[in-house]
Amino acid sequence: MGTPNPSTVGILPVGALGVAFYHHLTGGAHERDPGVTFLSRRGGSGGERWREGSSLGIETATQARGVPLSGRLAGTLPSAAARGALPDIVLVCTNPDQLFDVVSDYVAVVEHEHRCGRLLPGEARLPCLVLCANGIYFQRIRSSFIELLEEATLLGRLPDLWPDLMPAVVGRLMRGVTLQTGLRRGSGEAALYRPGPPGRTQLTGGDRRARSAAAAHLKGRGAWFEDAAEVPPTRVEFNKALVNLAINVFGQLEAIGPDGRFRVLTVGQIGAPSQHARIFGLVEAVVNVGRGVGVYRAEETPQAIFEETLTWMLPAAEHVPSSLQWLEQQISAGTLTPGLTPTEKWLLQPLQHFARSLGDPRAIQYFEGLEGQLTEAIGRAMALQRGP
């Protein structure tokens, strides 16, 4: 497959994580960097909210500034393809339940390249699509990607991609498991974004050569990206799931009191020594399921992985976890609703699915119990929000 504009990166969409990536990939520069742009989903609201005349508020430890978005908005993936403005690498920073829309947009790009006569000769201009949302989902999204491509073939919008073209097209889909943090205060154009310090993002899955080149390019721009090499995507997702569950699920359970009152907590507070026994219990449950599905080796002990988890949490000690940020915003706006946030949904429910597939009643009870505790805590916060 050909690669468009090999020096460009697209970030989809504007959001806390995306702005943090933008900040580090541009070196915090005030001037417009033509090598980094923002994209939006066809089904999202970003196209209406952010316009050429908009300004992005970015705050660092030393200054707050407005970054004009003129020249920094590339539209949706299909519209960028139509203008010949596709970046080489797209960092997808949506919620996990929005990834299906992004993949659908990407299939529209593949169809566009076919109509332009570039797909069959192997000259299609297809970016590396790096999924950076939290959760355990890569294999499922990859399967959906293949199904959408095959459906497009059935409907005559694409040629038969097997056996040669399909691996090349699917090889553009990658997973970016990230520890990058970012904070957003407010909403819409009035939002103020505060990027966290550089955090590691591991690229895994997809075509080996394309992934290595993408990691090298992103690293060369000054951001902390690494090629995970032969480590499978699901293994890297499980490792990150431990961090997310510890700081987001336990964080919410700790932040919402018995009376429903909410208090903001940092990762350092959530991971304090007094909480280590609970975090270790989480690690044991995740490792047991991970062994069953071939993610962890038999000789890998929960104790060693627990210590690794604490090490991964350490750089974000001063950060307020994303789910707590979301809770604070919903409570402040009086719009908190029942159910899990997308992050927790795409962590707990896949783990429950694996546990059921393995027939592990203890794991099923553990992960369903966590979901129940979280649902009850959010219910308490909602009851307080409604008042007497």
Image (tube, rainbow, N blue to C red):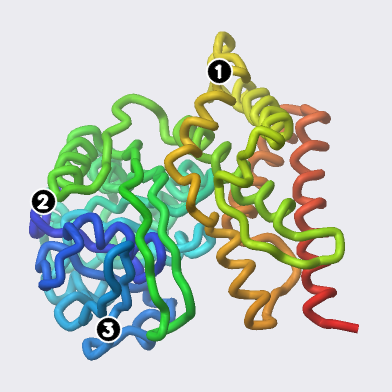
Please provide percent x and percent y for residue 81.
19, 70
Q: In percent of the image, x 48 and y 79: which residue is there?
A: 186
Q: Residue at x 48, y 37 (%)?
A: 314
Mark 3 or 1, nearer chain start: 3
Q: Residues within 10 Å of mark 3 (few under 14, many from 20)?
A: some
Q: Could you tell me if residue 33 is visible in this image? A: yes
Q: Earlier in the sequence, mark 1 or mark 2?
A: 2
**Image depth: mark 1 or mark 2 in front:** 1
Residues under labels 1 and 2: Cα distance? 43 Å
Report the quarter where the C terminus lies. Answer: bottom right
Report helix, strand or loop for mark 3: strand
Q: CA distance from mark 3 to mark 1?
A: 46 Å
User: Which residue has dot 1 on it?
Assistant: 304
47 relative to 265 in the view: left or right: left
Q: Which numbered disc, 2 or 3, marks the residue that appears first in the sequence? A: 2
Q: Residue furthest top?
A: 299
Q: Residue at x 72, y 73 (%)?
A: 337
Q: Secondary structure at mark 1?
A: helix
Q: Compared to 218, does 340 lie above or below?
A: below
Pointer 2: residues within 10 angstroms few (<14), some, or many (20+)?
Answer: some
Disc tally is: 3
In the shown orientation, is residue 125 left or right of residue 357?
left
For label 2, the residue is 2
Give residue 152's position: percent from left, percent from top: 36, 61
Residue beneath the point at 27% across and 70% down: 63
Residue with the mark numbered 3: 55
In the displayed structure, 27 sits above or below 281; it is below
Q: Amino acid at mark 3?
A: Ser
**Which of the 4 image quadrants contains residue 338?**
bottom right
Three-letter residue code for mark 1:
Ala
